[in-house]
Amino acid sequence: MNLARHHITVFEHERIKLNQEINGCRFDDLKLYALQQYYGDKGVPYFSLTHNGIQFNEHVGVIQVGNLLIEVLPKADKSEHSKSEEKKWRDMLIGMMRAVGSFDAKVTSNSQLKIKANTVLDLYIEMFINEVEYLLHTGLIKKYRKTEGNTTSLKGCLVYKKQLQQNLSHEERFYVRHTAYDIENQWHILLNAAIKFIKQINTNASLHSRIGALMLFFPEMPTIKITEVHFEKLIYDRKTEGYRKVIEIAKLLLLQYHPDVSKGRNNVLALMFDMNKLWEQFVYVSLRKYYSDCKVSAQTSKLFWQPDNGNCTGIRPDIVIQKENITIVLDTKWKNLNGYNPSADDLRQMYVYHEFYKAQKTALIYPGVGAEITGNYFDVDSNLNREMQCSVLQVELKAGNMQEWQHELAESIKKWIDKM
């Protein structure tokens, strides 16, 4: 394993060109070719191909190509690219992901996150390690499984055909089919595959010894080719519920890995997240947590249009708040207004929410710093309708204490609602 990782940091919507050097690392033709192969004919949602390069979009996270780690950070202002800016946005991204539950997992009392928040990938790997260490500490579950083979004692059902084929001259052996109760089961087979995988991709030296310890203490399991079907077949019960989070992390890592079969050395692992959805979820969980005297719902659908033949089309705002007999609809947008008004499409969308949800107030939630803006819609006779308002609320982004930031966010929206 090569622990020398080359690290490039860019922001969302930025472009990387062939032979461009960032942080002393060169984006060479082999790395570009690996990403082009990964993109394929159908494309991927994380970036687009440009002439001799790639351009990222609103997805953030990490893409590892061979020993080159490309870190894509969110950015909602026009500040210059610097080390301090990288740290600010990296801390904010990781803090938001923790807040919405992306890193919600158990850890033993003496096994907290000890490494620096270098990248999202490092944090996911360490969270996986913490979870497996916890399972080893508390004891791996046992399950019943059907098995067959030669034994020295007769147990279960004797398989006559195989007995005659293999044991005709070995009277001391029995070929039987029986039920075993042990730790060899589908959960441990998947975890064993994930442990071997993180040993292969890890380039963080501070995690190397802990991965080696897992390789030593985790029981050896059969090797299989992991697909999404293996995760879909899992059925959780009281004994296996504690495996849910670590299996989710294993699934995320194993199914996002794309080996470079043609070159053999620039495998691609993409761990990317849609910043629009993360921002929406962050606002939602903040309101749920710190605005307890009302009902906060996410993605509440209503039917909108019915064709003569076919399925209905619905509408679904990001957040709906019910307070007594008052309905408030919020829609989150991960983009900076930079002093401009919201787009016409966003305003039309909020007009529809007013109508279909009988809302008393609606608002668009943007990241950034700026005064609250409230506007009214015109009716069909081109008169201002004072009953139909749409506000623009801008939330200042912070990378420090996430709980304080969530509380401030919820309080600012609560004050706006209380202006009824």
Image (cartoon, helix red, strand yellow):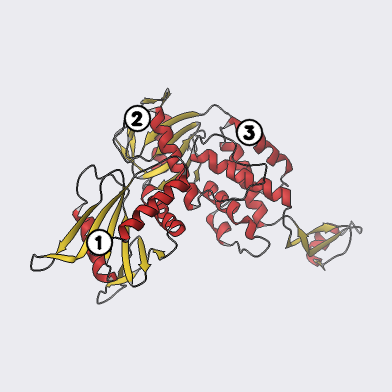
Quarter holding the N terminus is top right
Q: Position of residue 122 (x, y in %)?
A: 54, 38
Identified by mark 3, the residue type is His
Residue drawn at x 42%, y 22% is 24
User: Residue 170 vs residue 98: left or right?
Assistant: right
Disc 2 designates what residue? 81
Mark 1: few/some/many CA within 10 Å (<14, 14-19, 20+): many
Q: Nearer the viewer, residue 417 or 46?
A: 417
- Name the secondary structure under disc 1: helix
Identified by mark 2, the residue type is His
Q: Position of residue 339 (x, y in %)?
A: 21, 43
Give the mark nearest the N terminus, 1 or 3: 3
Give the mark nearest the N terminus, 2 or 3: 2
Q: Position of residue 307 (x, y in %)?
A: 25, 74
Hey, which quadrant is residue 129 in on the image?
A: top right
Identified by mark 1, the residue type is Met
Residue drawn at x 61%, y 64% is 235
Mark 3: few/some/many CA within 10 Å (<14, 14-19, 20+): some
The numbered dot on residue 208 is: 3
